Amino acid sequence: MIATRFPFQTRPAEIAEVTANTLESRVLASQKEHADERPSKHTIVNGVVKYHGRTFVPADARRDVLAEAHRLHLGVKKTAQAVRDLGYDWPQLEHTVSDLINACLICQKTRLANFIKLKMGATPSSTPFERVAVDTLGPISEDSAGNRYVVVITDTFTHFTELVPAPSNNADAAAAAIWASICRHGIPAILHTDGGPEYANRIITALTERLSVTHHRTTPFHPQSNGHVERVNREIKRHLRTLALAFNSFDAWSTTLLPYVAWIINSTVHSATGFTPFELLYGTHAADRQIPQPDNNAEDETPLTSVAEYLTVMDALLAKLCRKAHKRQSKTREGRAETQSVPVKPGDYVLRKNHAESKLHGHTGPFKVIEVNPFTAVVVPLLANEPRRTVHLSHLIQLKSDLS
């Protein structure tokens, strides 16, 4: 019966002995060839150069010793101790081991790594519904109306949000919600969505091309690229849970609770602008009946008597509110939009964060960088016949191994 041997078990004694003898002969031969590399604090015992009581290893033989000591791909301290346990040593051993581990492809793919860090990007807009962010929230428990999803439409300037219930998460539901919003608020310049099949399809493409709307899609596996609507999604879920429990209404959330959630979001002051979304869009608070004067003159509260007067006051008021909101948003963006150096360039090799495979596979790659953009990079795999792909920089690790 053949005994099963596991990877963590010690190698057979005969193989270990041959490896040790071969390694020792290489080190001793290197000592004779590179006698000028002997450290200042060394001794010679039976013709062997010793350092701290262990056999000194010249530079050209260290790779073989490190390969033997690093078989289990342990950390710096344990690998350095493994070198000493083998009976070898040299000055700045830990520094050499650290360089080895940093360049080890297996270690880079399997260890917790520091991905490229970028500052939060800015998506400036200066007028209401110039840039619109859209996402689909769900699935949620199906209610009496048959709805399980919510199409969330957010104006990135005023942060005014519309919530459209839908029975399914498909192109028809997304296109219907977007078209209804356009009919209410006008055609946006930019439509921002993720790359899911409900938004990356012929229906949405036909709609945006027909209306000359620029369609931006987020980088795969990076929902932060659509941060406006992702933050709103968290608020929607929290308010829906709260209201469902408060009113014990779980079977009619899309008809009774969802409009209330939209009211709460649009009538609450947003930290980025200092105003409620409703106020920025309509010039008044959601609960007010009187349009306030733009100069905030409390003594003059006479009602508006004509459409022309209403339009004049409203135009001045909205212009003033938009200037204040734009100024506040600009201050917020100043700390985000600073020029930052990207640590990778075309021709570099990188690993990509593993999203699809089992955790046993570690980080995927290596990939070669073909193109670098402000927040993304176009990479092509080296070890597989796959097409190039666009990856967010925060999902990449710069490879330190020499693959040339």
Image: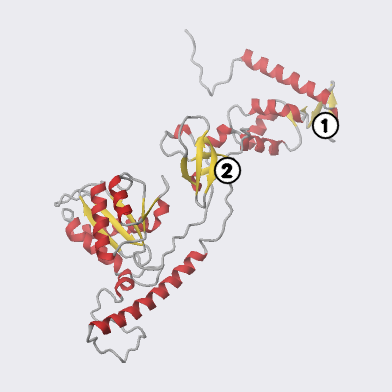
Earlier-in-chain disc, 2 versus 1: 1
Q: Of the residues tagged 2 and 1, which is closer to the observer? A: 2
User: Would you say 316 lies left or right of 31 here?
Assistant: left
Residue that numbered label 1 is attached to = 37
The amino acid type, in three-letter code, at marker 2 is: Pro
Q: Position of residue 341 (x, y in %)?
A: 59, 53
SS label for mark 1: helix
Q: Position of residue 336 (x, y in %)?
A: 51, 61
Residue at 41%, 72% in the rendered image: 325
Seen from this angle, which residue lies furthest bottom?
A: 299
User: Would you say 287 lies left or right of 349 here?
Assistant: left
Seen from this angle, which residue lies furthest left?
A: 144
Q: CA distance from mark 2 to mark 1?
A: 38 Å
Residue at 58%, 20% in the rendered image: 10
10 w.r.t. 385: above or below: above
Q: Position of residue 50 (x, y in %)?
A: 80, 28
Residue at 28%, 80% in the rendered image: 311
Front-lying residue, 67 or 330: 330
Front-lying residue, 370 or 112: 370
Type of colouring: secondary structure
Residue at 76%, 33% in the rendered image: 90
Image quadrant where one finds the C terminus: top right
Q: Position of residue 242 (x, y in %)?
A: 26, 59
The amino acid type, in three-letter code, at marker 1 is: Glu
Residue that numbered label 2 is attached to = 346
Mark 2 neighbour class, 10 Å CA radius: few under 14, some 14 to 19, many 20 or more:
few
Seen from this angle, which residue lies furthest top?
A: 1
Corner quadrant of residue 196: top left
Q: How many marks?
A: 2
Front-lying residue, 69 or 219: 219
